């Protein structure tokens, strides 16, 4: 059963959309919201699998809310609005579907059929989206704390003694989508291979890789197993797999691990960074960008101590100064830089400079 939050300032439209969605097998509306601020709190409380968004709303319009949602908490969103002129543009803002509200001449049955067709066509994506803990469990076990898996349980620490292939690894979470886009727009296609662990749901990672690719000279793709690491290419971890690397002969290739979450995340920055330290050691550049929590701190300290070039995004330019702050506090960072300087540091690193 896929849970849905309906956002619309019209009480009658909320009721109509709710009734239609509840009539569809596999879908259930668990809550409704009257505006963006109400929706924000409901998303935190109920963690729905899908949200429907109206464009014309008080306090904050639906487009602004959608953009903020994709930046801070990426999740499947369908726009249901009378603003039909935005039907094409809305996908660039991150929506996975658009349904025009019924006009005067359209029957309710016709509108119902359009809603049903759209949602059923999205089930393939929703199946890939990381499902959250059921609401019932939250009510009865509000103090339950998820066991935090150490990277040792997935990938042992075997730091490389000799430097291997030069490469760049990046870790990011909340705010990372837009921040990575800002960085990649400035990158040339001459950089060493780039591997990215961004906390993002599966189903969004592939489309995000395409966005990065379309906005950069670097060739960006969602990583698959056994891909050759090449200059001028970047590999984004799928939203439900850990990304690692492995040396095969004289080549380095991607390896995906479908194991438990590490540091409460999958993909985990700790897993990617440790893999880099195990295989290339001091030849790596590790970048910790905006994000909540401490994923990546353990392995970034290992990279730092092994002679790798480690940098962190500064507080001023972070959406959430969590992951960089933890890495800095752990003594894992050599340089702290503004978001807009990260691309320059990557280019300098590719040319053999570390300052």
Image (cartoon, helix red, strand yellow):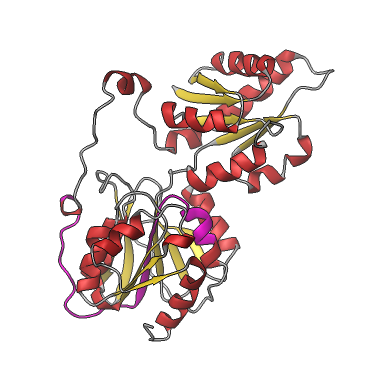
Residue 4 point in image, percent of width and height: 51, 25
Residue 229 point in image, percent of width and height: 38, 70
Q: Is residue 256 left or right of residue 53?
A: left
Would residue 191 be seen by someone viewing this image from the given angle? Answer: no
Q: Which quadrant, please, contains the N terminus?
A: top left
Q: Is residue 253 left or right of residue 125?
A: left
Residue 186, placed above or below residue 170: below
- Reply yes or no: does residue 158 show up in magenta: yes
Q: Which quadrant, please, contains the C terminus?
A: bottom left
Residue 140 point in image, percent of width and height: 28, 18
Q: Which residues are magenta?
A: 153-181
Report the number of numbered marks: 0
Residue 290 point in image, percent of width and height: 42, 57
Q: Please give the name of the residue rendered at 26% of the width and 64% of the height, measured from the top-left corner.
A: 300
Foreground of the two, 227 or 171? 171
Q: Please give the name of the residue rendered at 36% of the width and 82% of the height, measured from the top-left corner.
A: 354
Would residue 317 be seen by someone viewing this image from the given angle? Answer: yes
Q: Is residue 124 left or right of residue 141?
A: right
- Reply yes or no: does residue 284 show up in magenta: no
Residue 91, placed above or below residue 105: below
Foreground of the two, 262 or 354? 354
């Amino acid at each position: 059963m896929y849970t849905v939050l309906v956002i619309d300032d019209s009480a009658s439209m909320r009721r109509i959309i709710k009734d239609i969605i509840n009539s569809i097998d596999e879908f259930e509306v668990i809550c409704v919201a009257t505006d963006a601020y109400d929706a924000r709190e409901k998303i935190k409380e109920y963690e729905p699998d899908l949200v429907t968004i109206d464009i014309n709303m008080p306090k904050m319009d639906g487009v602004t809310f959608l953009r903020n949602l994709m930046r801070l908490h990426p999740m499947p969103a369908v726009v249901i609005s009378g603003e039909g002129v935005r039907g094409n543009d809305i996908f660039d803002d991150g929506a996975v579907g658009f349904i025009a509200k019924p006009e005067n001449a359209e029957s309710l049955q016709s509108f119902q059929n359009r809603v049903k067709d759209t949602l059923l066509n999205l089930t393939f994506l929703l199946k890939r989206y990381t499902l959250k803990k059921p609401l019932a469990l939250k009510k009865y076990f509000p103090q339950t704390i998820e066991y935090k898996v150490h990277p040792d349980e997935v990938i042992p620490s075997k730091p490389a003694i000799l430097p291997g292939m030069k490469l760049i690894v990046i870790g990011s979470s909340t705010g990372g989508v837009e921040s990575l886009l800002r960085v990649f727009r400035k990158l040339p296609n001459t950089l060493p291979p780039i591997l990215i662990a961004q906390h993002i749901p599966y189903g969004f990672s592939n489309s995000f890789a395409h966005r990065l690719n379309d906005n950069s000279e670097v060739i960006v793709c969602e990583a698959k197993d056994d891909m050759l690491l090449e200059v001028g290419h970047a590999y984004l971890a799928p939203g439900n797999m850990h990304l690692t690397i492995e040396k095969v002969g004289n080549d380095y290739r991607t390896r995906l691990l479908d194991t438990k979450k590490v540091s409460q995340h999958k993909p985990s920055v700790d897993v990617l960074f440790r893999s880099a330290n195990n295989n290339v050691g001091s030849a790596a550049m590790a970048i910790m960008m905006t994000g909540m929590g401490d994923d990546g701190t353990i392995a970034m300290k290992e990279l730092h101590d092994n002679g790798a070039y480690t940098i962190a995004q500064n507080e001023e330019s972070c959406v959430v100064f969590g992951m960089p702050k933890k890495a800095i506090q752990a003594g894992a960072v050599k340089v702290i830089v503004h978001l807009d300087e990260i691309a320059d540091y990557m280019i300098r690193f590719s040319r053999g400079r570390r300052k």
